[in-house]
Amino acid sequence: MAVRPSRIASAAAPSTSLRARYEKYGARTIFICRFLPFIRGIAALPAGASRMPKRYFLLYHAFGSAIFCFALAYLGFAFGQHLDAILPAVQRSSRFILVIAILGVVSYLVMRRRFASRPGL
């Protein structure tokens, strides 16, 4: 199969548009990603790839981290003050979450076995 030059040019376009978007919204992205679990750790990769200046990265990274840490500490303090009222609700919901997790694992195993038995997939 021959590759046309237009396809090569269009394949390069998403990376340049991604870089342009990150340069435009990079500071906001770094700040917001500090509040999102699992994304916190990889938010620095696009910043480095787009060559974001270190001073801006460190400023927004530190500011977002400080807000997140103080908010988390405040929530821990507030929940600690009302632990007697919160604990029964947490215990009730933990049973429900456990049932949902078990159903998820069982459905994953059933789907895996079902797809494994199909040839060619």
Image: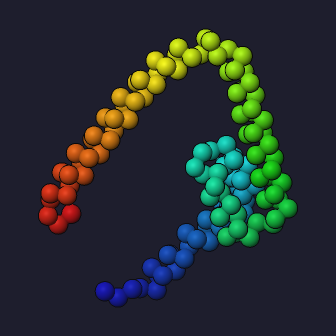
Which color scheme does this rendered protein use? rainbow
**Residue 67 lies in what quarter of the image?**
top right
Q: Residue at x 46, y 86 (%)?
A: 5
Query: Residue 73: image x %, image y %?
Result: 74, 32
Q: If the image is split into quadrants, where does the N terminus sit? A: bottom left
Q: If the image is split into quadrants, where does the C terminus sit? A: bottom left
Query: Residue 70: image x %, image y %?
Result: 78, 35
Q: Residue at x 56, y 73 (%)?
A: 13
Q: Is residue 85 visible?
A: yes
**Residue 36 lies in what quarter of the image?**
top right
Residue 68 position (above or below residue 93): below
Q: Residue at x 72, y 58 (%)?
A: 26
Of residues 59 and 109, which is closer to you in this image? 109
Which residue appears farthest toward the bottom when viewing the image? 2
Q: Is residue 28 visible?
A: no
All told, the count of numbered labels is 0
Is 60 left, or right, of 106 in this rendering? right
Query: Residue 72: image x %, image y %?
Result: 71, 34
Is 46 left, or right, of 115 in this rendering? right
Q: Residue at x 19, y 58 (%)?
A: 116
**Residue 24 lies in what quarter of the image?**
bottom right
Residue 94 position (above or below residue 32): above
Query: Residue 94: image x %, image y %?
Result: 46, 25
Residue 78 position (above or below residue 52): above
